[in-house]
C-alpha cells in the first residue's frame, strides 16, 4: 500500500503517491452513501451543517463565538504599478501573530472585494515565491484587497513549528481572523470575499469555505481528490476534523455549496482522476443544492502541481465573474508581468532585526497551544 506524502519535505512540486486501493474504496463508498442519503436540498443542507459542526469540533473551535477586533501591525508600504504592498502581522491570539502581506489597489474609489491567498507546502519560499506574488499583485491591480499569509512555522511565522499538534486549528483560526480583519476595512465590501490556494493552500481554502459563510467564492487547486484525515500533513489531517462525520476531501469541497467554487486538477499528481472520480459527486450535490451554475471544474492533463499561468488565468476569470459589482470596483484584466514587481523575502518579511516581535510574543509549541486554548475558553465565557 502506498502512502501520501503531502508534507513539507517537498520542494515546489509535490511528489504525492496515490492512496491505496482500500482507502480509495472507502472514500468511494462514503460518496455513494452520501449521494443516496442526502438527495434533497433540505437533507443536503442538514449534512452540510453536520460537516461544518464536526469539523469545528474536531479542530477544537466549536462553537464559534463573537470575536474582538483584530489588532494589526502594519509597516513598510511600497507602491508599484496600480497596487501597493504592506507587511502585516495580525495578533490572532494574544501574543501570537499571523504574518503576511497586504496588497491593495491604488486610487480605489469604492469598496471592493477581499481575497485570501494562503500558500501550500512549496519550499523554500512559500508566500515569497514568484508565482504567489504575481497572483496577489494582479488581483490587487484588478481592484481587490488581498491578504497573502504564511502557514504556521513558515517564513516569518516562527513562534511555533509546522509540526505543532494544533497546527490545523491554528491555521484555520488564522484564516477566520483574517476574514474578520479584512471585512472591517473601509475599502472592502464584506459581501464579496474569496479565497484561493494550491496544494496545502487549497486545503486551507476549502476548509475555510466550509466553515465560514462569509466566503462567497473559493478556488482550491491541485488538492481535491480522494483523501481523508488523518492522511496528509498535520495541518490537514492532524486533528479529527473528518473522522466523526465519516467524510473526505471531496465531500467537504461539495459542502461549500451553494457558494461559487472553481476546482482545478492536473494530470501529474493525485488529482489526475478528479474529473471522473470527484467532480461528478460535487456537481451532483451542487445541483441538489440548486446551485449547479456556480460550480466549475478545470483539468490540465499535461500540467503539474502548481499555481501556474494557465491556472491563474482561470481563477482570475472566475473571481472576476463572481466578485464583480455594479460599482465596477473589480475588473477582469489580462495578467501583465511587466507591471508586477517581484520582491525579495527581505522586503516582505514582517519580523526582522529592524521590526522584531513585540514584547510578550509567545515562543514554542507549549506556550502557543496553551495561550490558544485559554483564548478560545475566554471567548466562550
Image (cartoon, rainbow, N blue to C red):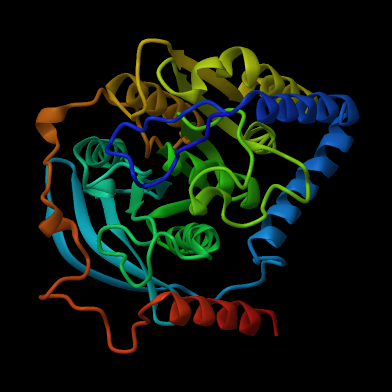
Q: Point out residue 104 in the picture as x, y percentages from the top left corner.
A: 27, 50
Say above or below: 111 vs 326. Answer: below
Q: Quadrant of residue 64?
A: bottom right
Q: Residue at x 46, y 65 (%)?
A: 164
Residue located 34% across and 29% down the image: 306
Q: Nearer the viewer, residue 338 or 130?
A: 130
Tell me residue 150's x, y (percent): 34, 55
Q: Quadrant of the N terminus?
A: top right
The C terminus is located in which quarter? Answer: bottom right
Q: Residue at x 84, y 43 (%)?
A: 46
Which residue reaches farthest bottom? 360
Is any atom of residue 290 visible in this view?
no
Report which quarter residue 354 is drawn in. Answer: bottom left
In the rendered image, residue 299, in percent from the top left (x then y), is placed at: 47, 15
Q: Give the percent coordinates (x, y) of residue 79.
A: 12, 52
* Residue in the foreground of this view, choosing between 129 and 240: 240
Whether residue 39 is visible: yes
Between 99 and 229, the one lying in front of the other is 229
Tell whether 77 sits left or right of 13: left
Examine the rendered structure and indicate whether residue 145 appears above or below residue 61.
above
318 left or right, relative to 207: left
| Number of marks | 0
Amino acid at each position: 500500500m502506498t502512502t501520501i506524502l503531502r508534507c513539507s519535505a517537498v520542494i515546489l512540486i509535490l511528489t504525492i503517491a496515490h492512496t491505496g486501493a482500500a482507502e480509495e474504496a472507502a472514500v468511494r463508498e462514503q460518496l455513494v452513501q452520501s449521494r443516496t442519503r442526502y438527495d434533497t436540498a433540505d437533507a443536503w443542507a442538514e449534512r452540510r451543517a453536520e460537516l461544518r459542526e464536526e469539523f469545528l469540533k474536531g479542530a477544537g473551535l466549536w462553537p464559534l463565538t463573537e470575536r474582538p477586533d483584530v489588532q494589526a501591525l502594519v509597516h513598510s508600504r511600497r507602491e508599484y504599478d496600480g497596487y501597493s504592498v504592506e507587511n502585516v502581522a495580525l495578533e490572532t491570539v494574544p501574543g501570537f501573530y499571523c504574518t503576511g502581506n497586504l496588497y491593495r489597489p491604488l486610487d480605489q474609489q469604492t469598496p471592493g472585494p477581499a481575497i485570501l491567498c494562503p500558500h501550500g507546502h512549496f519550499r523554500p519560499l512559500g508566500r515569497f515565491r514568484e508565482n504567489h506574488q504575481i497572483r496577489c499583485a494582479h488581483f490587487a491591480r484588478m481592484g481587490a484587497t488581498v491578504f497573502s499569509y504564511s502557514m504556521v512555522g513558515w517564513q516569518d511565522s516562527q513562534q511555533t513549528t509546522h509540526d505543532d499538534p494544533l497546527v490545523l486549528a491554528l491555521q484555520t483560526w488564522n484564516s477566520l481572523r483574517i476574514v474578520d480583519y479584512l471585512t472591517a476595512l473601509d475599502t472592502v465590501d464584506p459581501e464579496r470575499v474569496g479565497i484561493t490556494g494550491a496544494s496545502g493552500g487549497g486545503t486551507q481554502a476549502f476548509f475555510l469555505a466550509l466553515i465560514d459563510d462569509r466566503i462567497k467564492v473559493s478556488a482550491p487547486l491541485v488538492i481535491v481528490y480522494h483523501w481523508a484525515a488523518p492522511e496528509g500533513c498535520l495541518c490537514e489531517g492532524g486533528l479529527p476534523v473528518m473522522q466523526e462525520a465519516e467524510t473526505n476531501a471531496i465531500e467537504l469541497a461539495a459542502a461549500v455549496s451553494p457558494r461559487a467554487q472553481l476546482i482545478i486538477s492536473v494530470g501529474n499528481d493525485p488529482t489526475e482522476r478528479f474529473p471522473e472520480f470527484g467532480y461528478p459527486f460535487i456537481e451532483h450535490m451542487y445541483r441538489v443544492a440548486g446551485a449547479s451554475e456556480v460550480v466549475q471544474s478545470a483539468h490540465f492533463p499535461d500540467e503539474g502541481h502548481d499555481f501556474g499561468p494557465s491556472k491563474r488565468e482561470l481563477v482570475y476569470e472566475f473571481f472576476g465573474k463572481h466578485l464583480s459589482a455594479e460599482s465596477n470596483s473589480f475588473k477582469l484584466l489580462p495578467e501583465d508581468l511587466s507591471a508586477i514587481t517581484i520582491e525579495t523575502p527581505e522586503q516582505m518579511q514582517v519580523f526582522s532585526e529592524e521590526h522584531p516581535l513585540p514584547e510578550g510574543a509567545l515562543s514554542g509549541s507549549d506556550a502557543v497551544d496553551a495561550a490558544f486554548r485559554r483564548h478560545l475558553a475566554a471567548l466562550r465565557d
